[in-house]
Amino acid sequence: MKKFFDLFALAALAVVVLMPRPGVEVKAAVEKLDGATQQRIAELQAVLLRDPQNLEAAIEVADVYRTIHRPEWALATLGPFRERAAADYRVFFGIAMAQAERFELHDAYQAMARALDACARNKGPAQCGPAPEARMRMVQMGLQRVMDSKIDPRQHPEVVAEAMYGSLRSTKIDKIRKSGAPAKAPAPSSGPAK
């Protein structure tokens, strides 16, 4: 009889603790996404559900997660591939970018170093050329600058963004300027003739 009351008390406690509160609002995990992005996420998640070893789908959905400002989801998606796909630079590049967006700069720097190492070996399914390698080196140098400056990235997130992405923007512009290619003139407006 005593065991019956113990079980009853435990069940009552579980109901009280686990029962949803009336004031709790359930919201979508990701709000305000266009239909195409939602559809693509659903397709990629379905592919990963059928085949958890699908590296291409994991890399693509992790990139989408980072785009919609969910780097923790990107880390959870790419995490299992750290050892399984250690030869693919894209795995560590995605991990490094997600960690940088979470302001885990030291871990991001180490992951970027692994991406560069995998790029140098070039034994993954996707070949690493000079463009991805240059991009990774620039982001790694930006991370190093932020770490050396001792700035708290949580108080100044714009510093991290500028260090990581600012060098990429300026490099593209400078490369175009140094190539000697003439700047395109704006197209003439086709307004009404007088």
Image (spheres, rainbow, N blue to C red):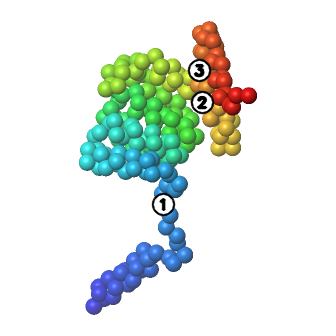
Q: Which residue is mark 3?
A: 172
Q: Which residue is mark 1?
A: 28
Name the residue located 36 percent from the left edge and 40 percent from the top edge: 58
Which mark, residue 165? 2
Q: Is residue 24 above or below residue 105?
A: below
Residue count near mark 2 (Cα–Cα under 10 Å), binned few <14, some 14–19, many ≥20? some
Name the residue located 46 percent from the left edge and 45 percent from the top edge: 65
Q: Secondary structure at mark 1?
A: loop
Name the residue located 32 percent from the left edge and 21 percent from the top edge: 123
Residue 186 as seen in the image, left or right of residue 104: right
Residue count near mark 1 (Cα–Cα under 10 Å), binned few <14, some 14–19, many ≥20? few
Report if the CB atoms under discs 2 and 1 are less than 8 Å apart. Answer: no
Q: x, y (%) of residue 149?
A: 68, 30
Look at label 3 and name its amino acid: Lys
Q: Would you say residue 79 is visible in this rendering? A: no
Foreground residue, 130 or 91? Answer: 130
Give the mark nearest the N terminus, 2 or 1: 1
Residue situated furthest front in the rendering: 194
> How many numbered discs sit on the rendered protein?
3
Q: Secondary structure at mark 2?
A: helix
Q: x, y (%) of residue 46?
A: 31, 49
